[in-house]
Amino acid sequence: MYADKLQQFENVENLGGKAWEHATAIDLISNSKITHCSMHCFHYQQMFELLLKHLLETKTKSGAFPRSHKLNHLFSLLVESLELELDAEKYFDALGTITTCAEAYRYDFSLDCETYKHAVSSLDVLLDDVIKLS
C-alpha cells in the first residue's frame, strides 16, 4: 500500500527514493507475522521524515532541510516555506506521536500501539496530500 503511494520515487537515488524504501519495508512488515507496532512505527517515521525533507530540498527556495527528526517541526517548515493552505495544527499531535514512537523504538518496545495506529490513520490523509506536492 505505502510502496504504491510512493511509487514515483521507486529506486530514485535521492531522499524520495529512501522514503520509498521505507514504504516498502512497512508493506513487508504489514504482511509478516510481526504483531508489535514498533518496527512499523520506525519505518513509518523514516518514510515521512525523508519525504518531508525531500520536499523541503526540492520545492523550497532555500533547498535545505534541518537535521531534525521531529516530524511536526519538518512539517511546519514545509507549510511555512510553501505557504500551504493546510490546517497544520490538526496534524501536530499525530506527528509528535509518530516521532516519539520512533524514538522509543530504539530503546523500549513497550509502545502504545493503539495510539500509534490512531496517529497513522490521521496521517495517512496528510501523506496523500504531501505526496501530491511532489
Image (tube, rainbow, N blue to C red):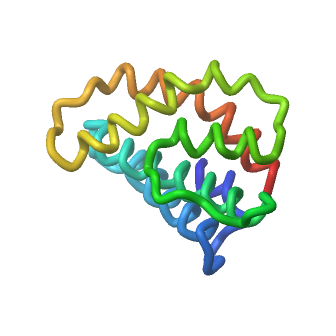
- Left or right of 26? Residue 88 is right
| For residue 94, side relative to residue 57 (left or right) | left
Up the image or down, 93 lies above or below 24; here it is above
Camera-side residue of 112 and 58: 58
The image shows residue 104, relative to residue 131, as above or below, that is above
Q: Quadrant of residue 127?
A: top right
Left or right of residue 57, residue 61 in this image: right
| Residue 46 image position (x, y, % from top left) | 46, 54
Q: Nearer the viewer, residue 124 or 93?
A: 93
Q: Which residue lies furthest to the bottom in this view?
A: 13
Q: Quadrant of residue 53?
A: bottom right
Image point 41% across, 29% down: which residue?
97
Q: Where is residue 50 in the image (x, y as percent from the top left)?
A: 55, 58
Residue drawn at the location 74% of the way across and 49% of the way down? 131
What residue is at 76 percent from the left and 47 percent from the top? 81
Q: Which residue is at the far front?
A: 62
In which quadrant will I find the C terminus? bottom right
How many numbered circles does the render carry? 0
Q: Position of residue 38 (x, y in %)?
A: 29, 41
From the viewer's perspective, is 77 left or right of 22?
right
Residue depicted at x 34% and y 35%? 100
